[in-house]
Amino acid sequence: MVRTHRGISNGSAAGVVAGGALLLSLQSGPSAAEPPAAGMPGSAVGSSVGGMQGPRYIPNSFFATTTHFNTDLLVELLGDLNLRTVRLDFAHDLLEPAAGRYAFGADNRVIQSANLGVSHGLDQLALISHPAAWLKVAGSGDMFPNDESVAAFEEFVYQIASKYKGQIRYWQAGNEPYIPAWKERYVILLKALARAVKRADPANQVVLCGFSGTPYRDPSRDPEYLDLVYQYGGKDSFDIIASHPYTWPLLLEEGRCLDTITRLHEVMVKHGDSKPLWITEIGWSGVEPAMLGQLQTRFWHRHRSRSEEDQARALARLYLVLATIPWVERVYFFHLQQEAKYTDTLENPDFYMGLFTPWIGDRIRPKDAYFAVKTVIQMIGESAYQERLALAPDLWALVFTRGDEATVALWSVGADVVLKLGDTAMVKSVTSMVGSPVLISAEELPAAELRDANGGLIVREDRPLDWDGPNTLRLSGRPLYLKMSLPDLDRFKAQIRDAQPLATPRRGGG
């Protein structure tokens, strides 16, 4: 995305304020896994990744975000999320305003940000961008370096990479250049950066740029741009491929993200390459529903915006789906904290993409997306993805294991689906997209009460509950997480695979 040096507005530590369905009757007993039968409801666009899914370990570094500039508040929020992998702006114009004059002092905003991340043990990706005027190619926007400044640019990168030797290992070569215009100019930048960071420390890794965005209605041009990088001789100058496969306003399974990933892999294979992929930007602009209509009326491009609820669904499902692709090593959602109140109605959609929104004074309010990201990290971080169970195309059921326990993530891309299980004894717990418990059995009803600190009853156990009956789960666009012991996993999978869907009037989805 296009950025400024505006950064995060709340920079100091502050307080965080906190119709029908498909009915699947699940019977006990073994059943072989079979492909979904023809004519089953739904057809989620991009709901599979041809030949690229498979078992893999999911390290904590898989979950990542852009902070732009670290602050004490953002570090606190990262700690609460259990998220340690961040992408920073290393703005050249702030670090070398004149050729050979390096502004690496402790009072420099970039240096303060990087040093704070180092002191807290963050795994930081340094994005080299925002060239100073003297480095730009005349009349080309932000294209850099010009022919006279290649050596100076390489020396700058060497100096800053040397300063953080052993502390920052990953360096990204620019942000979203339009490769058909840049052509060999981008590879000049790439090679100069690669020479510099490797000279500073051979253990350093070069991350390719994320390419400039393509209108979401059109097929992604990322594969074409990657092919041009290879054609211009850039293959040996980067260690990691990057992509910004935005799908907004569509959610992940409905958009082109998975197709882009597949086609990028095909381009790599064509050129005999086998590098990992990092999604260094992806996200959704989540807006309070009452404000969404006003923004869409006022600004033509706000049709890309979604509600806060949709943003939460999108980010949770983003990590669940991309966890099934071993080639995708990291996913940096964009970005951690947005910078504007809804009442500001800023035209730039970037300012509504964070997990928080400014609230009263210098405090902030977390969106549902915050709790969705925190929960998916808790549920599948440091686990092993095993398989996607064969169900109807619009239904996702992903199996993860950690130690002697299994977690099954379930959601529906289309209409709501009711799962009527014959036996729930094997299910230890059911957790919602935002981390709250979900009732599944009649035996849990007496515990469905909330007491205050003095033991006083707040919610009585006979209060009407929003559920579909005992041994029943409602799947929607909000993922559910079911935990069970490994020995019970096969019994649960057998019930799921035996499901016989019965179509009824639609009640929701997405």
Image (cartoon, rainbow, N blue to C red):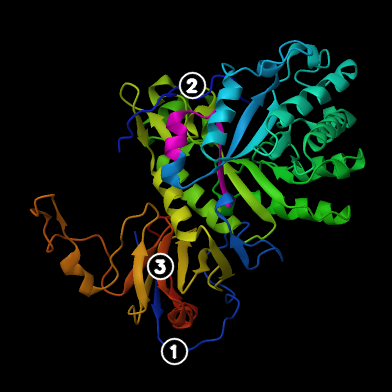
| Location of residue 112 with respect to 100 vertically, above or below | below
Start and end of the magenta stretch?
62-77
Query: Of the residues shown, which amino acid type is indicated by label 3?
Result: Leu
Q: Earlier in the sequence, mark 1 or mark 3?
A: 1
Q: Residue at x 67, y 36 (%)?
A: 215
Q: Which residue is drawn at 90% across and 15% down?
A: 148
Residue 144: tell me if it is visible: no
| Location of residue 58 with respect to 302 vertically, above or below | below
Query: Of the residues shown, which amino acid type is indicated by label 2?
Result: Leu
Q: Which residue is drawn at 34% across and 78% down?
A: 424
Q: Which disc number belongs to residue 482?
A: 3
Query: Of the residues shown, which amino acid type is indicated by label 1?
Result: Gly
Q: Classify 10 Å Cα crowding around label 3: few (below 14), some (14-19), many (20 and above).
A: many
Q: Which quadrant holds residue 214?
A: top right
Q: Which of marks 2 and 1 is nearer the N terminus?
A: 1
* Inter-mark Cα distance, 2 to 3: 40 Å
Q: Residue at x 40, y 60 (%)?
A: 506
**With 324 as the anchor, is 437 left or right in this view?**
left
Q: Where is residue 457 in the image (x, y as percent from the top left)?
A: 9, 55
